[in-house]
Image (cartoon, rainbow, N blue to C red):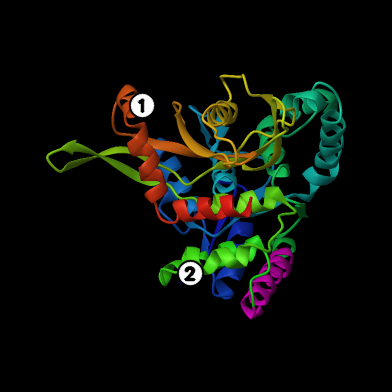
Amino acid sequence: MPTQLFLSSVSKGLEEIRLQVGSFLNSLGHEAVLFEYTAFAKNQDKQMVHTCLKAVGDCQIYILLIGHEVGYVVAEAEKSITHLELRKAIACNKTVYVFVDQYIKDIYLREYLRIFRSLREQEPHVSHGTLPSTDEVLARLGSISIPRKVFEILNDAYQVVPWIFGFKSAEDIIQTLRSELSASLKAYIDLKNKKQIHSINDVIVAADRFRQNNLFLESFFPLVSEITISDYNEVLRKVQSHLKGGTIYYDEGYDIVSELVTLGNSNGSSLYRFDGGSKLNLIGRSGLASGRHDPIGLNDPELFAAVTFKDALAGSQPGIKLQSSEIFITDEQIYLCHVFGDYVFTVHFPIEELHVEGAFMEEQADVLYKGLLSLKANSDIIKLFSFCL
């Protein structure tokens, strides 16, 4: 099955460039998912949004082209459909490439990022671990001739990609993708050619093969014992990308099974470490998880990681490593919090459709927890991660 590359941009203004880039990708044997090639244009409003976001979730690589317009804006989200596609790609940990019109990059983006980085190093952002908003940066940027929402998209993109490429023509994009995709292929071939597993990334990639032979945990743990985690953010990104959503069911009785909730794939994770006193320090994050850097207190009832760790401490026994889990339910997300010794691993899943009343789902917390861990490889991946810690 060919690799699917979702080519995202506003529906008008970049048609010719999209077609040329899409033709190039198809010529390499990939499948370019373009607005023109699908029924997207025939769908309207919420149906169009659902169609586009589902396509992003199904692709392996997401390519964003940013010009001088933002296209259709979804009223409920107050964001363009292009922006929502980017956030979906981020939440699903897709490989993301971002291209912006060279004029915007030269005239606005360089100065925008300079101001952004400057504000990030100032209060209150340093103390609270927050990032400057688009409004903060634009207030210092001065007069602009392109829509504000273009900068909102760029602001989100800047948080997750190492480089935003400029382009004047389709050929600029094609040359960049030729180089980037070649580098990705080389990395894959290097992994296949390895005689043994050397890193957590290698382990995650190999997970499906081990599971096929029912030897995942037995074959895997001896290999993990020598691994030292040096980049928690990268590890979390890899772990999160393998934590899957789906529909969770509950038993009404008499063997009648009904849908409880449908969840999307994990869209964020965080890792905290206990400081030995009364605080948890954030040491890694991925996806849409909060990037706050200030320590959190164990007595804060609003922070799920703190509540989970405090409960684990309350039930601890001398000489036995802390290990417990809790689940938390909000209007939009399900949070799983796991305590492994001095670490708290928090992962969240977006609620795509709630099939019962919210109060009833609260009563089904145990069913929800077991259901999440039974989805695909979720339980094994979490056990693996706890073993590494």
Magenta stretch in the rendered image? 174-195
Q: Position of residue 11 (x, y in %)?
A: 55, 46
Q: Please report the residue visible at 57 percent of the width from the left and 20 percent of the height from the top.
A: 302
Residue 177 part of the magenta segment: yes
Q: Looking at the picture, which amino acid does disc 1 mark?
A: Glu
Measure the C-alpha gap from mark 1 to mark 2: 35 Å
N-terminal label among 1 and 2: 2
Q: Position of residue 184 (x, y in %)?
A: 67, 68
Which residue corresponds to mark 1?
362
Say which element carries label 2.
helix
Which residue corresponds to mark 2?
210
Between 302 and 56, the one lying in front of the other is 302
Q: Position of residue 282 (x, y in %)?
A: 70, 36
14 versus 314 height, above or below = below
Between 36 and 316, the one lying in front of the other is 316
Residue 19 part of the magenta segment: no
Say which element carries label 1.
helix
236 versus 303 height, above or below = below
Task: Decide if residue 105 is in sight here.
Answer: yes
Q: Main secondary structure of the magenta part?
A: helix
Indicate the quadrant where residue 1 lies: bottom left
Q: Which mark is residue 289?
A: none
Q: Position of residue 334 (x, y in %)?
A: 46, 34
**Within 10 angstroms of label 2, few (less than 14), some, or many (20 or more) residues?**
some
**Within 10 angstroms of label 1, few (less than 14), some, or many (20 or more) residues?**
some
Task: Decide if residue 63 is in sight here.
Answer: no
Question: Is 157 situated left or right of 264 in this image?
Answer: right
Q: Please report the residue visible at 70 percent of the width from the left and 49 percent of the height from the top.
A: 232
Indicate the quadrant where residue 156 lies: top right
